[in-house]
Amino acid sequence: MILKEGFKYSFDESKCESCGGKCCTGESGNIFVNQEEIKLLREHFRLGELEFGERFLRKVGFKFSLKEKEFEDGFACIFFDTKKRNCSIYALRPTQCKTFPFWDYFKTHKKELEKECIGITYLS
């Protein structure tokens, strides 16, 4: 069970195994990565900057986001394993993914959090 100061819920990461990847799939969105995360992924895949960028990134303003792929009735992160229904780069996942579900956004969007994450429990 994970708790984070300032959040009125806890997160049971053991629920991820039975979830099916709701946090990695659904509506289209941005999965932001910073330069250090890009570097680690490039090294992992042994790809140059240009090739990695073309295959896995899209530019969003001044930032980079991982690409998405069509999946079921929506989209999935390019690194979502659709057969195993989990992250194929879990050890190298971006900070945005590592900090889920403890995003400030979810402090005021509880219904969306409940829809996306079966591992949360509200604190009394």
Image (tube, helix red, strand yellow):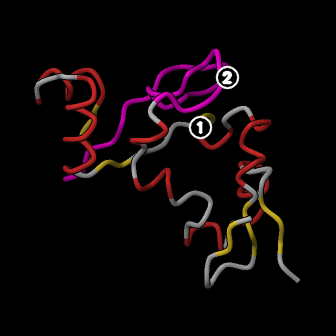
Q: Tell me, yes or no, whether the highlighted magenta stretch contains residue 70.
A: yes
Above or below, 107 relative to 48: below
The x and y percentages for residue 64 are 26, 44
Looking at the rendered structure, the secondary structure element under dot 2 is loop
Above or below, 106 relative to 19: below
Residue at the spot of label 1: 27
User: Start and end of the magenta stretch?
Assistant: 62-88
Residue at the spot of label 2: 73
Residue found at x 53% / y 19%: 70
- Nearest to the observer: residue 48 or residue 61: 48
**Quarter residue 96 falls in:** bottom left
> Amino acid type of disc 1?
Glu
Q: Tell me, yes or no, whether the highlighted magenta stretch contains residue 80.
A: yes
Above or below, 118 relative to 73: below
Outermost top residue: 83
Residue found at x 39% / y 41%: 92
Looking at the rendered structure, the secondary structure element under dot 1 is loop
Quarter that holds the C terminus: bottom right
Quarter that holds the N terminus: bottom right
Outermost right residue: 124
Estimate how packed mark 1 is, as few (under 14), some (14 to 19) or many (20 or more) residues with alpha carbons within 10 Å. Answer: few
The x and y percentages for residue 22 are 68, 39
Q: CA distance from mark 2 to mark 1?
A: 9 Å
Above or below, 102 relative to 52: below
The x and y percentages for residue 25 are 61, 34
The x and y percentages for residue 99 are 52, 60
- Nearest to the observer: residue 69 or residue 11: 11
Q: Is residue 90 left or right of residue 3?
A: left
> Amino acid type of disc 2?
Asp
